[in-house]
Structures are given as structure tokens and as C-alpha cells.
Image (cartoon, helix red, strand yellow):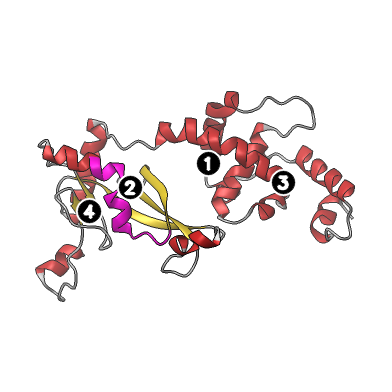
């Protein structure tokens, strides 16, 4: 039986901790996610190999130095974190991935290290709401050709990120209308589906309109509009409040009416 077979077939009761450690280390030492086929790589990590290497290059100097041969490489650290992001599951399943070869506690340590680095150095580089003139021009052309509404540069919506139930005295504010505990994260995307803005501060019971009304982006757009900026709009669904800079559908539009055509 190979070490890989043992890793997946042997239960934690059958294999002692020392053997598990040796198996994981052997898997980790022999594993190189970059050897995967490009299509499989994207399926696993939601990034192309080129994008993966670009991120790795940007954060490499910010990570803890590798002090020994037993240290986890930066490639495997980033792969583990992206795998965790990609599958929206728990750390144990990432730890049992033979391409990663880490125990769950190790995955937790790696997550703690990389989350701060990614938030501080990668997010500000790519998640930026201010548009350049060229970006704004292209977005407006795309949305006008797509839906016939002028001056639209992006779309907003909320998504529920599932979490474990918090403390009992807080659970009611995180329990969403879909029947589970979550964070209600608001995102704005441009015409290329690039994320331009994220607000993930609000519990799952918060309504989309409430999240919007207390967001920094709403304050900015309101200020810009009052200062004469009337050529910059976001599209939203019926969960958001209509305003000069946030276009939403008509409610209860009759079939074949002008309102229904607008909604379509």
C-alpha cells in the first residue's frame, strides 16, 4: 500500500499521530500544485497559474521566511488558502487534500498568516472603486449596449457567506432569511465582473438596503451627486433603494408594460 492510499483509506484511529505526520510530510514534500494541468489547477484554486504566480510574487517578501527543509513552502501556503477560499468549506477538507498535505491545525496557522497579507497587500491593489476615465468610458459603453441605460458603471448585490453559529446572544442577528448563519457581504462589480468594492461587516439578518444605507460607497455617491456628478450610476435589484445614482427595478410591474420592459 502506498503512502497516498494509506492517507485516504486509513482512519485516524488506525494510524497514529506520528505516522500521520510522516505521511503528510511525504505528500507535502513530493507535491507541487504547479505540476497540475491548467484546467485542473483553475478548478482547484480559482486562479490561472499565471495569476497564482503574480500573487505569490507580490506577497512573497511579506511571508515568514523558510528556515528549514521541513518548512512549508510559499507555494503550498498560497495553494492551501486559495483552496479554502475556492470550496467554501472547512479547514479539515483542505488538510486532507493530497495536493496540500497539511493537517487542519497547520491549515489554520497558514490561513492566519496569509489572510492579513492578502488583505493588506493584494486587496488594495485590485479592489478599487475609483475608476480611471478609460475604465469608466468602457463600462458605460458596455452597460448601455447591454441594457440601454446610460451612465451605468457597475452592479451591486449582496451574498451570504455561511458561518458557524456565534454566541447565543448574537445568533439572532446572524441568522438570515434563508435559514442559516451568515455574513451579508455587499459587492460592486464592473462590466468585466471585477470586484470593485466589498463591504463584509454586517450580519446575515441585515437587509441589503440597510447594508447599502450605512456603507461608505453610498456616502461617496451621495456626495458626488450633490456636487453635480450626475453621470455615474450603479444597477441594483429590488432589495436596494432607488436613488439618482442607484437604479433599481419597478416593483410589481404589469406584463408587457413599459415598466416590465425597463425591468427586463
Give the residue number, with chain letter if any, for mark 2: 188
Q: Work out how far the residue at label 2 is from the one at label 3, CA to CA, in angstroms.
A: 34 Å
**Contact flag, marks 2 and 3 (Cβ < 8 Å):** no
Q: State which quarter of the image contains the N terminus.
A: bottom right
Regarding mark 2 in the picture, which secondary structure is present there? Answer: strand
Q: Work out how far the residue at label 3 is from the one at label 1, CA to CA, in angstroms.
A: 27 Å
Left-right relation of 229 to 25: left
Regarding mark 4 in the picture, which secondary structure is present there? Answer: helix
- Sort mark 3 into few (<14), some (14-19) or many (20+) by Cα contacts within 10 Å: few
- Name the main secondary structure of what is drawn in magenta: helix
Spot occupied by residue 108 in the image (x, y as percentages of width and height):
66, 44
Give the residue number, with chain letter if any, for mark 1: 48
Q: Residue at x 22, y 57 (%)?
A: 241
- Sort mark 4 into few (<14), some (14-19) or many (20+) by Cα contacts within 10 Å: few
Give the residue number, with chain letter if any, for mark 4: 146
**Contact flag, marks 1 and 2 (Cβ < 8 Å):** no
- Sort mark 1 into few (<14), some (14-19) or many (20+) by Cα contacts within 10 Å: some
Amino acid at each position: 500500500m502506498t503512502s497516498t492510499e494509506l492517507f485516504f483509506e486509513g482512519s485516524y484511529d488506525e494510524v497514529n499521530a506520528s505516522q500521520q505526520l510522516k505521511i503528510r510530510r511525504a505528500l507535502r514534500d513530493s507535491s507541487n500544485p504547479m505540476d497540475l494541468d491548467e484546467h485542473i489547477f483553475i478548478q482547484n484554486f480559482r486562479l490561472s497559474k499565471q495569476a497564482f504566480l503574480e500573487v505569490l510574487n507580490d506577497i512573497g517578501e511579506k511571508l515568514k521566511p523558510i528556515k528549514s527543509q521541513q518548512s512549508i513552502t510559499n507555494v503550498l501556503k498560497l495553494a492551501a488558502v486559495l483552496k479554502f477560499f475556492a470550496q467554501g468549506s472547512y479547514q479539515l477538507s483542505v488538510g486532507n487534500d493530497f495536493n496540500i498535505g497539511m493537517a487542519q491545525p497547520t491549515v489554520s496557522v497558514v490561513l492566519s498568516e496569509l489572510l492579513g497579507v492578502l488583505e493588506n497587500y493584494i486587496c488594495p491593489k485590485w479592489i478599487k472603486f475609483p475608476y480611471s476615465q478609460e475604465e469608466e468610458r468602457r463600462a458605460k459603453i458596455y452597460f448601455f449596449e447591454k441594457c440601454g441605460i446610460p451612465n451605468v458603471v457597475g452592479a451591486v448585490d449582496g451574498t451570504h457567506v455561511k458561518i458557524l453559529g456565534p454566541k447565543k446572544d448574537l445568533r439572532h442577528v446572524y441568522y438570515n432569511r434563508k435559514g442559516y448563519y451568515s455574513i451579508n457581504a455587499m459587492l460592486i462589480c464592473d462590466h468585466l465582473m471585477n470586484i470593485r468594492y466589498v463591504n463584509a461587516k454586517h450580519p446575515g439578518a441585515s437587509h441589503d438596503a440597510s447594508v447599502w444605507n450605512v456603507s461608505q460607497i453610498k456616502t461617496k455617491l451621495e456626495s458626488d451627486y450633490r456636487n453635480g456628478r450626475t453621470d455615474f450610476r450603479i444597477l441594483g435589484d429590488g432589495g436596494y433603494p432607488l436613488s439618482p445614482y442607484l437604479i433599481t427595478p419597478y416593483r410589481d410591474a404589469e406584463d408587457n408594460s413599459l415598466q416590465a420592459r425597463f425591468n427586463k
